[in-house]
Image (tube, rainbow, N blue to C red):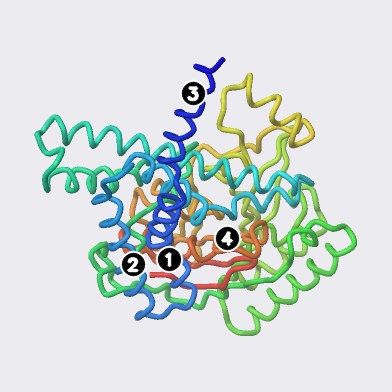
Amino acid sequence: MKVDRLALSSFKKKLSSYFSLKIIKSSFLTAILLSIFIYFSIFENIFLSILGLLAFVFGVFRLVFVRKSAAFVWLLTGFFVGVFWFYWIAFSLVYYDFAYLIPFEIFGIGVVYGLIFLCFYVIFSFFARCLGGAGGVLKPVILALGFYLIQFVHPFGFNWLNWHLSLIGTPFERVFAGQNDSKNPPFKIELISSRIPQNELWQSSRKKEHFVNNLALIDKAIKNGARLVVLPESAFATNLNQNLELIETLKEKSQKIAILTGAEGSENGTFYNSAYFFYAGEMRRIDKHILVPFGEEIPLPEFLKKPINTLFFGGTSDFGKAGDFSYIEVEGVRFKVAICYEGTRPQLYADKPDFVLLISNGAWFIPSTQSTLQNLLLRYYALKNGSVIFHSANFNDKKVIR
């Protein structure tokens, strides 16, 4: 019994040396330095963006040159980075009546990224030892390479951890710039933004009000001489392909202006997150191709997917999805269409589209830095691929990003 107590005491002492308050505070500070540029970019100020980049570089130096309990510093830094970058993912639980799970999901996000950081530290410190650089300058260089490569690990396909974003908003962002001839369509495009809370968007008592307002905004765009009007994701919160009266109204208006709007679709018992294109009296439904992991689909094997859908989503199935992305054409100009999460996926830009029409709904994550991080990613992809992105959103500013 005495031996057991001594062993337990020794274990606690060893554990406390790894997770001491000093190590936790140091890791917390490093994570702040690696994340603060996101929060500075809210102000769209070049000096704050440069300060955020300098903080990021200093954070990298702190991480790769750490000596004492380095593995645990990487683990904890990754944990806090995951929380600072992606805490907002958990906010959507409010709308599924699981608000009490928010702290647990945020903790889980931190654990995932903490383990990713730890794995890269273990692997690349091993490489450093193999190359004879365990105690010299070579080890920090190899660890810096490992840190850089962390961004290419996408848990469940989620790819928003991108160190390149630290350069956005600074003079150094041009290093990403591809071929961009400052293209512009030869006609006016009206982008619509809105501020409708998620809990109101699908309320039956408010739908008519929102629909009337959307139709009025389309009329205003016609009056302003626009040839294309773009409304946000879920602007018409209904299964639009089954709302024949609304379809006829939009078809009639499309004789005067091309309309792209977000709404749900349903077909053979499957629901789709869709964009609807009305042009010259015709309608076309464009279904989302890449779904949000754990939001629109459960990216797990079927034997795990079913119980999760039953437990958290009332037994509903995943959303359906299109086989590929789609283009629309207005007056001879081609636009690639994307819905929310798709706009931040590299697959969308594989063919270097000149113009992208992106519709989003950020109300799921208000208040948070989700829209800020999304804007940084959009700017990154626009620069890298020479694309012009026309972004219409609920709870994000309408923007032309190039």
Which residue type does callout 1 highlight?
Ile
Which residue appears farthest toward the right when viewing the image?
Answer: 205
Q: Quadrant of residue 68?
A: top left
- Contact between labelled residues 4 and 3, with CB atoms less than 8 Å apart: no
Q: Is residue 182 visible?
A: yes
Helix, strand or loop status at disc 1? helix
Taking depth in this image into account, of 52 and 76 the one nearest to the observer is: 76
Residue 295 pos. (x, y %): 63, 43
* Separation of marks 4 and 1 at Cα, in angstroms: 27 Å
* Sequence-first disc among 2 and 1: 1
Which residue type does callout 4 highlight?
Ile
Give the residue number, with chain letter if any, for mark 2.
Answer: 55
Residue 238 pos. (x, y %): 77, 53
Which residue type does callout 2 highlight?
Ala
Give the residue number, with chain letter if any, for mark 4.
Answer: 359
Position of 338 relative to 216 (above/below):
above
Left/right placement of residue 338 relative to residue 347 reads: right
Give the residue number, with chain letter if any, for mark 3.
Answer: 6
Which residue appears farthest toward the bottom when viewing the image?
Answer: 224
Helix, strand or loop status at disc 4? strand
* Sequence-first disc among 3 and 4: 3
Please tell me how crowded label 1 is: few (under 14), some (14-19), or many (20+) other residues with Cα within 10 Å.
Answer: many
Which residue appears farthest toward the front when viewing the image?
Answer: 2
Helix, strand or loop status at disc 3? helix
Name the residue located 33 percent from the left edge and 67 percent from the top edge: 55
**Of labels 2 and 3, the one closer to you:** 3
* Sequence-first disc among 2 and 3: 3
- The mark total stands at 4
* Separation of marks 3 and 1 at Cα, in angstroms: 44 Å
